[in-house]
Amino acid sequence: MGPDLRIDTAITAVLTVAVLPIAMLPALGVVVRRYGRLQPWPLVSAAGLLASASALAAFTLFPLPEPGRLDCTGVGLTDRWELDPFAQLRQVARAISHRGLADALDGWMVRYAFLNVLLFIPFGLFLHQVTRWRGTRIVGIAAGTSAAIELTQGTGVYGMYPCPYRTLDLGDVLLNTLGGALGLAASVGIARLAFASPRPVPDLEPPSRARRALAVVVDVTLVVGLALATASTVQALIARSDTLAHAQERIGTPWIEIAIDVGAAAAVTLLPSLLRKDRATLGELLLNVAPATTGGAGHPPTWRMVARWATRWLPWALVPSLLPAILLAEALVAVTRTDERSLSSLVSGTTTLTRPALAALRAPRDDAPVPAREGS
């Protein structure tokens, strides 16, 4: 495998593992908007969906073969494809009939089949808990996700490798789909319990510290993801006209690292807050909160948003090792103050409210409660 192929494969691996979990991030927004706050079990379900999606994405690609160790001699694209969806089930049935279930479970084939079912049970369960979609849709998504995993494996990560390094097996799709259906069945039973379907609230109270902190965590995740993707892409572009070693040296230049980090922080947390009317970052939008001026219901002017960003995000982008200290300072100020405002809120003269509360303050009604002006 040449340097260009190794770089392209690394980028594809990073992006593939990131795409599915990031695609599941809106689950947090669904929970907040459906129930009006971060209710315990819906939050656990959203986290479970993110975790199961991450596990499936990682299972799709890893372990990657070591460079130069993949033998593709005489191996065509379809040579490692098993297109009979029932072939695996027939092998399992023969193993059980010849050896009995207890002894067959010691064999690799039977355990592998059970693993394929178990792998998708949490995905089907948490997907239904978060979305409450129809069963046919949940099962269809499980089948489609499994088919995408098999296609990724059976095409050598869509041509990034000269031949497939894992098998495309339609039997896996069948078993994965069965796992998703079992997870759906479990979710239907859980949904009947009171804790799984809490009563929605209007969401006019000041957002909790946990909710605001989760918005920051989402923003941090997006900034880190964008910075890593940008650095990998720039390194790949440099390596195409130079050596891999020189590309790695160039990407490690301090001014390039700073430019990438500041650019990623600005793209995720500053530009949205300047371009959006409600001034929300992507993480705040997901958690349905937004900044407001401390003296009224108006949206903060541009200079206040820049000051807020420069206090919370710019120091970290310039010196990444400062992130723990910055987050700790933000948290300590929010915990010690009665109005729960953070350090960046104090510097910029802003606060954080829920977006429904901001809408109610802009257009108050006689019968609507007036929300308190508190937050980070």
Image (cartoon, rainbow, N blue to C red):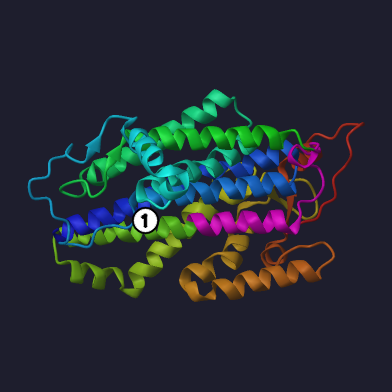
Image quadrant where one finds the C terminus: bottom right
Q: Residue at x 60, y 50 (%)?
A: 47
Q: Is 146 placed above or below 284 here?
A: above
Query: Where does residue 26 sit, x and y in percent of width and height?
Result: 57, 41
- The residue that label 1 is drawn on is 229
In the rendered image, the residue lying farthest to the right is: 366
Image quadrant where one finds the N terminus: bottom left
Query: Where does residue 207 sit, x and y in percent of width and height?
Result: 76, 51
Q: Which image quarter: residue 348?
A: bottom right
Q: Which image quarter: residue 145?
A: top left
User: Is residue 168 one of those drawn in magenta?
Assistant: no
Label 1 CA crowd tier, 10 Å (few <14, some 14–19, many 20+) = some
Amino acid carrying label 1: it is Ala
- Give 261 or 136, whichever is nearer the viewer: 136
Query: Where does residue 289 sit, x and y in percent of width and height?
Result: 69, 47
Q: Residue at x 38, y 65 (%)?
A: 259
- Give 224 or 308, whichever is nearer the viewer: 224
Residue span colored magenta:
194-222
Q: Is residue 356 visible?
A: yes
Q: Relative to 71, is 108 on the left or the right?
A: right
Query: Where does residue 140 sit, x and y in percent of width and height?
Result: 47, 27
